[in-house]
Image: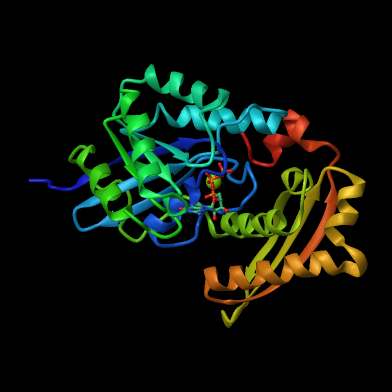
Amino acid sequence: MNNIKSGFVTIVGRSNVGKSTLLNRIIGEKISIISNKPQTTRFNLKLIYNSFDSQIIFLDTPGIQKPKNKLGEYMLKQSIKSLKEVDLILYMVDIGFENGELDNFIIETLKKINLPKLCIINKIDKLEQKDIDNLIEKYTNMDIFEKVISISASKGTNVYNLIDSIKSFLPYGPKYYSDDMITDQTQRDIVSEIIREKTLFFLNDEVPHGINVLIEKFSIRKNKSLVDIDATICVERKSHKGIVIGKNGSMILKIGKFSRIDIEKFLGLQVNLKLFVKIDDNWRNKLFKVKEFGYYNK
Ligand SMILES: Nc1nc2c(ncn2[C@@H]2O[C@H](COP(=O)(O)OP(=O)(O)OP(=O)(O)O)[C@@H](O)[C@H]2O)c(=O)[nH]1
Ligand SMILES: [Mg+2]
């Protein structure tokens, strides 16, 4: 008899509510990048949780937003598409805002989907218990969710309870992936995202949102002590190139240094990282470019 609970679970919600933070915590590795700026996650990625009695394949999705360009259209389609590919839907909100137009859009979309749904209220480390209780009541009263669970993804509060609840809504089934697989992303994908994460951390306004990182070289030296990585940071405008390079190269040095530290931690190898900057005029508005950079809805 198979007594493994297994299935596919998507997490959707507005940007910045903490979807990627939660999934990294659940699988215990930093795979999905995180930032305090909106629109950090750009495509659906799988993060796989394994335990002796379960395998949960989570889909991390881009925050729901009004698309402003071809990349934004792709991101919204990815989030919506994820709702059709799963056994269970997690809808995450945080404590910071009233339900706006975007949340209403998501809630209306969820109402039409005949699958179990859990509502996760994140960032409760910033709230008093009575306010948490009020929020739980508000989402429970919507009558859409099988359960409403409050957590702190960054502190880990209630995350084990959440995993137990998720399991209770999954069917018994096979393990779809081997136990040692925690993501569908390649090492190159993750390295590219680590570099983009640093640009989100150090740069402001539209600059990081217009960045795409291409890994041009990824080669492990014969004695396996070092990996040589060349990456190109594509920016949308000439002025952005100057900002990414910074005065006397100070910004690109900083992005390189912090990227290298994280890439070394991730690969467990020493890294020789070379960064280049290239202008790819207005690429987020050009469908062929968006596709060429790998953002493509099949
Ligand atoms: N205080 C607090 N901050 C949190 C918590 N979880 C996440 N954050 C912060 O919220 C911000 C957004 O986190 P992300 O995980 O990137 O959010 P996201 O929902 O994946 O965002 P998108 O990818 O843009 O849709 C980051 O600055 C996190 O550190 C939490 O439990 N408490
Ligand atoms: Mg994210």
Position of residue 182 relative to residue 162, above or below, is: below
Q: Report x, y in % for residue 171.
A: 20, 37
Position of residue 87 relative to residue 126, above or below, is: above
Q: Nearer the viewer, residue 9 or 39?
A: 39
Q: Nearer the viewer, residue 239 or 273?
A: 239
* Residue drawn at x 79%, y 70% as measured from the top left: 253
Q: Report x, y in % for residue 183.
A: 44, 53
Query: Does residue 130 appear left or right of residue 78 in this picture?
Result: left
Q: Nearer the viewer, residue 294 or 80?
A: 80
Query: Does residue 174 appear left or right of residue 244 in this picture?
Result: left
* Residue drawn at x 52%, y 75% as measured from the top left: 268
Query: Which quadrant of the figure contains the C terminus?
Result: top right
Q: Report x, y in % for residue 179.
A: 30, 58
* Residue drawn at x 68%, y 69% as measured from the top left: 258
Residue 298 visible in the current orientation: no
Quarter of the rendering containing residue 226? bottom right
Q: Report x, y in % for residue 104.
A: 50, 22
Residue 153 visible in the current orientation: yes
Query: Does residue 20 appear left or right of residue 139 in this picture?
Result: right
- How are the residues colored? rainbow
* Residue drawn at x 56%, y 76% as measured from the top left: 269
